[in-house]
Amino acid sequence: MKSKLVNMAEAADLVPSGSSIAIGGSIIRRSPVALIRELIRQGKKEFTVLAYPAGFTTDMLAGAGALKRVEAVYEGLFQFGFSYNFRRGVEAGLIDIRDFSEVAMAARFRAAAAGLPFMPTDALLGTGMAAYNPEQIREITCPFTGRKLHAVEPASPDFTLLHGYVGDEYGNVQFPLVRDADDLDPVMAKGANRLIVTVEKIVPHAEIVRNPNLTYIPHTWVEAIVEAPFGAHPLSCDGYYDEDEEHMHYYQACSKPGNFAEYADRYIYGPKDHWEYLAAALTPERIFALSVR
Amino acid sequence: MAYAGDYTLNELMVVAASRELRDGDLIFIGVGTAGRAFTMAVGIPIAAARLAQETHAPNLAIYWNNLLSPELDQIPPRLTQHHLTTWPTSAQLHNCSDKNDMLSRRMFDVSFDSAPQIDRFGNLNITAIGDYRRPTTRLIGCLAQTDHFAYVDRPIVLTDLKKRTFVEKVDFITSVGHLDGGNSRVEAGLHPGGPWRVITDRAIFGFHETSKEMQILSIHAGVTLDDVLAEMSFRPLVPDPVPVTELPTVDQISLIREAIDPRKILLVA
């Protein structure tokens, strides 16, 4: 097995401006936030984001002016409220938005995971999503029953960016036994074209092989793996740390009135890398308070 | 059975929702942000489900935030991600595709939904106000609310009665209700069904059996028909006489206050 371990800057270097990227996790949980910060720091832009529920990372890309298009089921920040940067972009006509329901978006990721040209679904019949998006949602007739259905296009992005728990240098990534499963990461990983995973900790291969059933992303699917402790901060990483409510309130206090630049200077452009970010955003006391292990 | 003299509007809505739930139902509860939106999307539905379990529907089950049958007598003190993850529950299905399959296989009997726009035929909009491509207000997208209306037998909408919410026609159809009324929903290819009840802070609505127009089922005590119509941009069907919503009982109110939500985690705003 070949080592796929790279650092954060090297991982972000792989992703050019203009790429379509699928972002894993869910709203305010276990998204590859450190990697998205690094993409913004490197000045990458014009991204198309595919997500199940989008959330904080998509909003940061919108704030940084790096977001061209979004295909997702939700954009918001759960208990912290609306996704203000994203919302302003859509209202100004700067972001092309393609809405899908959860059943329909999951069908798109599963089409990609199965290598199929489309997935049939009846979730979007009669909806505005179908009316406004004939490119990706097309009417078909069931060859068995004659029923009206939609064919939805596979969600097959250039890059898939996920944050996981632990992995080895070869890219085997494992679940903890108790975890929050309210996302599509395993399906998105299987359907990925080029998969980059950040993890809380790189562990020895000998630890991985002891519990092979916990490997939800096997090394053969992975192009690059990065060690990023608190790599989802200020979001939560289930089993490791909870969301940083103070940080999120500050983010919203900046974003709501249109001062994303203040936030970005302090936490994205100011720190030169993930380690400097952690030094700027966290103290030993905060780390202790957020940790749930 | 004594009716309660002292109850809050939220408690009345919990009881009204609870009465719509049946033994053996599997109920889908969504996510809410904070404040009133949280109470509507999460607080009232969970309290109603638990109240039904404690009274007439002991075999009712809920699915919430990828938790199938969480222990409702162990609601966490705070609903941060960690507390959701570790809330004792029968199952956390392996990923959301499993939940989506349960939806499209039509395993759910009831869903709770909420929306900033609902129209005469019960179509919902949670996506965009104004022109979809250049909206005056971009909302949160779709979530599974589309899927609830497509696949769940008896969706229940919980929302406050407001003129800007109850509109003649939604700006964007996120969830297909009874579409244009009559048989139009089924003609569009959807399963029969559509929204079952709309429970508000002033009245409870259903939909006419054939025309599928929204109709008043009952108005809460102390509220007049004019109060209700003043908060709607269209005129619903009105029965004569207009029934008064059944009051909560003393037992239901004490269950809510003492057993279901003693720490005021659910009914927050």
Image: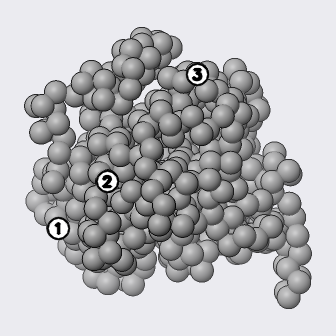
Q: Position of residue A34 (x, y in %)?
A: 41, 36
* Local crowd size for mark 3, using a 10 Å CA cut-off: few (<14), some (14–19), many (≥20): some
Q: Tell me the element at label 2.
A: strand
In the image, which is nearer the foreground, mark 1 or mark 3?
A: 3
Residue B142 visible in the current orientation: no
Quickly name the residue at label 2: A202
Name the residue: 17% across, 36% down. Answer: A287
For marks 3 and 2, the one nearer the N-term is: 3
Residue B73's mark? 1
Name the residue: 39% across, 84% down. Answer: B24
Q: CA distance from mark 3 to mark 2?
A: 28 Å
Label 1 and label 3 in one chain = no
Q: Does the CB distance between marks 3 and 2 fall below 8 Å?
A: no
Q: Position of residue B77 (x, y in %)?
A: 16, 51
Q: Does the CB distance between marks 1 and 3 fall below 8 Å?
A: no
The amino acid type found where label 3 is placed reads: Gly
